[in-house]
Image: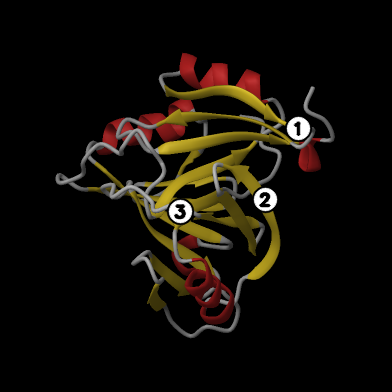
Amino acid sequence: MDLAKQHLDIGLYTNRREEQLAFWQGEVGLEFDHVGKLGRGIHQLRHHMNGSILKINHARDPLDQLSPSGYRRLSIAKPGLAGVQSLTDPDGNAVDLVPQGHKGIAGIGIEIAVSDLAAARQFWVGALQFQAGPDDTVLAGDTVLFLQQDGNVKSTPDSMAGAGYRYTTVQIHKCDLEHAGILQRGGSEGGPPRTIGTTTRYSFVRDPDGNWIEVSQRAQLTGSLD
């Protein structure tokens, strides 16, 4: 996969705008970038995170009561820490602040609960063409994915409109090309490529447990949407 940046992004949904901003900016210390309007009363509050972006999608209307996705914990490297600081945001999302280099994390790490470790590895390494790492990890650029076998995992809902971590984003140069390649290599369709104005062409694919991955061609990174 031809990456446009070496860091995955992660998106969450919430109805608690002010509480979430206070937590992620105040307690975690993330820098606010800008607000993107996604339509249907959803504003995306984007925050910088060691080259990655945390996308806090605030929904005006009450979110559906959905079972959690497989994205279970976000780890963020932070200079000067002597040890791991485990926190929980206002919606119950787990986030660890970790010393740089902890478990190989230079930027961020994402723990993913999976029902079948072999199938998950085949998807993230085979279909998405990321690099296999040690001890059931996958290296997506400099983002470390921790695959955790969990026999109680349920398939992720077909809707993302529920509180919690709901999707990751990989930034690439050619959305249509990469989307088709992922499907040919065994990924599942989540949503076909579409364009937002002059800024982004994006699609969605899904892993064997139904977790959502956004495939994003962002003009800010690629220069155009051609």
Q: Residues within 10 Å of mark 3 (few under 14, many from 20)?
A: many
Per the image, the residue denoted by label 2 is 36
Name which residue type carries label 1: Gly
Tell me which label, 2 or 1, sits earlier in the chain. Answer: 2
Tell me which label, 3 or 1, sits earlier in the chain. Answer: 3
Decide if residue 79 is on the left or right side of residue 132. Answer: right
Q: Could you tell me which secondary element the residue under label 1 belongs to?
A: loop
The residue at the point 52 percent across, 81 percent down is: 27
**Mark 3 vs 2: CB contact within 8 A:** no
The colour style of the image is: secondary structure
Name which residue type carries label 2: Gly
- Image location of residue 102, percent across then percent down: 47, 69
Per the image, the residue denoted by label 1 is 197
- Image location of residue 167, percent across then percent down: 46, 44
Quadrant of res 52: bottom right
Q: Vertically, is 87 above or below 152? A: below
Tell me which label, 3 or 2, sits earlier in the chain. Answer: 3
The residue at the point 50 percent across, 25 percent down is: 191
Per the image, the residue denoted by label 3 is 13
The residue at the point 61 percent across, 59 percent down is: 45
Name which residue type carries label 3: Tyr
Q: Specify the label residue 185 is tagged with.
A: none
Quadrant of res 159: top left
The residue at the point 79 percent across, 22 percent down is: 226
Q: Could you tell me which secondary element the residue under label 2 belongs to?
A: strand
